[in-house]
Image (cartoon, helix red, strand yellow):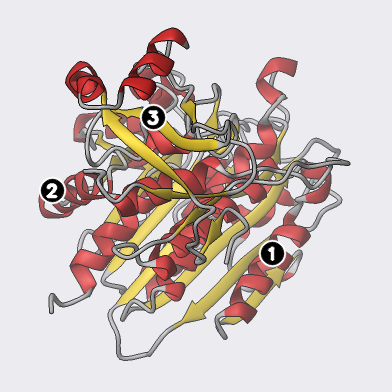
C-alpha cells in the first residue's frame, strides 16, 4: 500500500470533517460551544485551502475541518497531505462526501518527486475505510505517480534508453511482451520518420512496442509521443522555450500511465502500446527545413519546421497502429502551443472524427471529474498542409489554427474506419493547486480510462 494510505483504523485516527463552503454558517451553529469558539477565534476561513486543526480538551488534535465545494469534490483533500502533521486520519462517518473521490484527491496530493532530494518528511496517512475500493484508488494514484515521475525526471536521466527501461519494468510487472526497434533498424523495418527525427542525437532513436491481454479481446492501441528532449532541431527553440522540454515525452508518459491502469484493472482488451522515443537534437546529420522525409505509410512529408517533430515520429507509429485494424487508437502528445492558447494549460484538448466517440469521451470525463474538451478537425484547413514537392508539409507557415492543423496531419495516417482519439496535452502544471503540484501531470488520463471501462466492460 502507498505510504499515504493505511488500512488500520484505531482510536488514534483523527477524523477529517468536510464541510460544504456554502453551508458553513449553519454547520457551525450545530457544533459544540468550545468548537465554535475555537474556530471563530482562530479566524478559520472555510473558503481557503488551509484546514482547521481543532484541539480537544487536553490539547491533542481532535478533528480536522476542511471546506469543500461539493460532495464529489476531491481536490480539497488534495491539499491535506502537505498541511497535516504525521499520523493516521479518517473521513468522519457523518461526512456527506464521496469517500472514493476524497481518497483519490488525498493520494494525488501526497505526491513528491524525491529522486534528487536528500531529505523527506513523513506523510500523514488516510485510512481507506468501508466504501472505498483500495485497489481501484491505488491503481489511479500509482498511474498518476508514474506519469509525473517520468515527466519530472531530467532529460539526462530520461533519454530513449531510460524510457525503454521504464517501459520494460511496467511490462514485466504485468507479464506483457515488449520489443524495441533501435537505431538503423528503424530504416530497415520501415520507420524512416522516427529515424530522421532522432538520428542527430547520440541517444539512439527507437520504437518501443508492448502487447498485453488476450488475443481475442477487442484491440486497443495507445501511441505516445516520446520526444525525450526537444531543442527544436535546426529551427532551434529559445532558451525559455527549451527550459521544460524534458516534458516533451509527456505523451509517452500518459500512454504508459493509462496502460498501467488498463493492466492493473484487467480490462478485457488486447492492449498495444507504441512509443516512438527520440531526442530532437542538433548535429551535422540533423534533418533540415526543406528536407522531404519518407514515412511508414508511404506518404512523403516536406519539412517546413524541424520544431514540428512530434507529428513526424507519431505518423510512423500511427501507421503501424492502424495496420492491425484495432477497435480504437488513442494517441497522446505534447504537440502544440496552439492548443494551450485555445484552452489554457490545464484543460487538455482532444480530436476525433467520430461524434459517438466524442460524446462518450465527454460523458466519461464528467463521471471521472477529469475535464477534457473536444476541438474540431476542420476539413478546409487540410489545404494548409499541401506541399509543392511532397504529399504533405509537416507544418503550415500560417500562425493560426496550429492544433487543428497538427491533428489533420496525424489524421492523414489513420484510416477513417478506425475510431481514433488524439489528445494534445500540456502534461505540466505551471502552478501548484491542491492535489496538483507544479511539474509533470497526467491530464485527461482518468477520463480516458473511464471511457475505456464504459466501452469495453459489460455492465453487471
> Residue 166 bears which disc, if any?
1
Residue that protrudes farthest toward the front in the picture: 57
Who is closer to the viewer here, 319 or 454?
Answer: 454
Q: Earlier in the sequence, mark 3 or mark 1?
A: 3
Who is closer to the viewer here, 33 or 337?
Answer: 33
Vertical comparison of 397 with 349: above or below: above
Measure the C-alpha gap from mark 3 to mark 1: 38 Å
Who is closer to the viewer here, 52 or 21?
Answer: 52
Residue 68 appears in the rendering: yes
Vertical comparison of 301 with 180: above or below: above
Q: Earlier in the sequence, mark 2 or mark 3?
A: 3
- Mark 1 and mark 3 in contact (Cβ < 8 Å)? no
Residue 399 appears in the rendering: no
Q: Quadrant of residue 452?
A: bottom left
> Residue 225 bears which disc, if any?
none
- Mark 3 and mark 2 in contact (Cβ < 8 Å)? no
Would residue 116 be found to the left or right of residue 356 on screen? right
Residue located beneath label 3 in the image: 66
Residue located beneath label 2 in the image: 359
Q: Secondary structure at mark 1?
A: helix
Q: Position of residue 187 (x, y in %)?
A: 67, 66
Measure the C-alpha gap from mark 1 to mark 2: 34 Å
Residue placed at 32% from the left, 65% from the top?
130
Q: Secondary structure at mark 3?
A: strand
Q: Position of residue 306 (x, y in %)?
A: 63, 33
Amino acid at each position: 500500500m502507498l505510504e499515504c494510505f493505511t488500512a488500520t483504523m484505531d482510536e488514534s485516527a483523527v477524523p477529517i470533517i468536510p464541510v460544504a463552503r456554502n453551508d458553513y454558517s449553519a454547520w457551525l451553529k450545530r457544533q459544540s460551544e468550545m468548537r465554535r469558539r475555537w474556530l471563530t477565534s482562530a479566524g478559520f476561513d472555510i473558503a481557503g485551502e488551509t484546514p482547521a486543526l481543532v484541539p480537544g480538551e487536553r490539547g491533542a488534535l481532535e478533528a480536522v475541518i476542511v471546506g469543500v465545494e461539493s460532495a464529489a469534490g476531491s481536490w480539497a483533500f488534495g491539499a491535506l497531505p502537505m498541511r497535516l502533521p504525521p499520523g493516521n486520519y479518517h473521513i468522519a462517518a457523518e461526512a456527506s462526501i464521496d469517500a472514493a473521490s476524497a481518497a483519490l484527491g488525498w493520494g494525488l496530493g501526497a505526491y513528491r518527486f524525491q529522486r534528487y532530494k536528500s531529505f523527506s518528511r513523513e506523510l500523514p496517512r488516510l485510512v481507506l475505510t468501508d466504501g472505498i475500493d483500495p485497489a481501484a484508488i491505488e491503481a489511479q494514484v500509482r498511474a498518476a505517480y508514474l506519469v509525473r515521475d517520468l515527466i519530472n525526471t531530467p532529460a539526462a536521466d530520461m533519454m530513449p534508453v531510460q524510457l525503454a527501461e521504464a517501459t520494460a519494468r511496467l511490462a514485466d510487472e504485468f507479464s506483457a511482451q515488449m520489443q524495441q526497434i533501435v537505431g538503423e533498424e528503424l530504416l530497415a523495418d520501415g520507420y524512416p520518420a522516427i529515424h530522421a527525427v532522432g538520428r542527430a542525437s547520440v541517444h539512439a532513436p527507437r520504437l518501443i512496442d508492448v502487447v498485453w491481454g488476450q488475443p481475442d479481446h477487442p484491440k486497443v492501441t495507445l501511441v505516445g509521443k516520446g520526444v525525450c528532449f526537444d531543442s527544436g532541431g535546426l529551427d532551434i527553440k529559445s532558451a525559455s522555450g527549451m527550459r521544460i522540454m524534458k516534458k516533451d515525452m509527456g505523451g509517452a508518459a500518459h500512454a504508459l500511465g493509462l496502460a498501467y491502469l488498463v493492466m492493473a484493472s484487467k480490462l478485457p482488451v488486447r492492449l498495444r502500446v507504441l512509443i516512438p522515443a527520440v531526442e530532437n537534437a542538433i548535429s551535422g546529420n540533423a534533418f533540415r527545413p526543406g528536407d522531404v522525409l519518407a514515412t511508414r505509410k508511404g506518404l512523403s512529408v516536406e519539412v517546413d519546421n524541424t520544431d514540428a517533430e512530434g507529428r513526424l515520429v507519431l505518423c510512423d507509429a500511427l501507421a503501424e497502429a492502424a495496420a492491425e485494424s484495432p477497435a480504437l487508437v488513442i494517441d497522446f502528445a505534447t504537440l502544440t502551443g496552439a492548443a494551450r492558447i485555445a484552452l489554457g494549460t490545464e484543460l487538455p484538448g482532444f480530436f476525433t472524427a467520430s461524434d459517438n466517440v466524442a460524446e462518450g469521451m465527454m460523458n466519461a470525463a464528467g463521471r471521472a471529474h477529469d475535464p477534457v474538451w473536444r476541438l474540431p478537425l476542420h476539413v478546409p484547413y487540410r489545404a494548409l498542409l499541401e506541399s509543392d514537392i511532397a504529399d504533405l508539409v509537416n507544418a503550415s507557415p500560417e500562425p493560426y489554427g496550429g492544433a487543428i492543423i497538427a491533428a489533420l496531419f496525424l489524421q492523414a495516417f489513420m484510416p477513417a474506419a478506425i475510431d481514433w482519439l488524439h489528445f494534445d496535452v500540456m502534461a505540466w502544471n505551471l502552478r501548484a493547486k491542491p492535489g496538483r503540484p507544479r511539474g509533470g501531470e497526467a491530464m485527461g488520463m482518468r477520463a480516458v480510462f473511464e471511457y475505456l471501462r464504459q466501452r469495453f466492460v459489460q455492465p453487471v
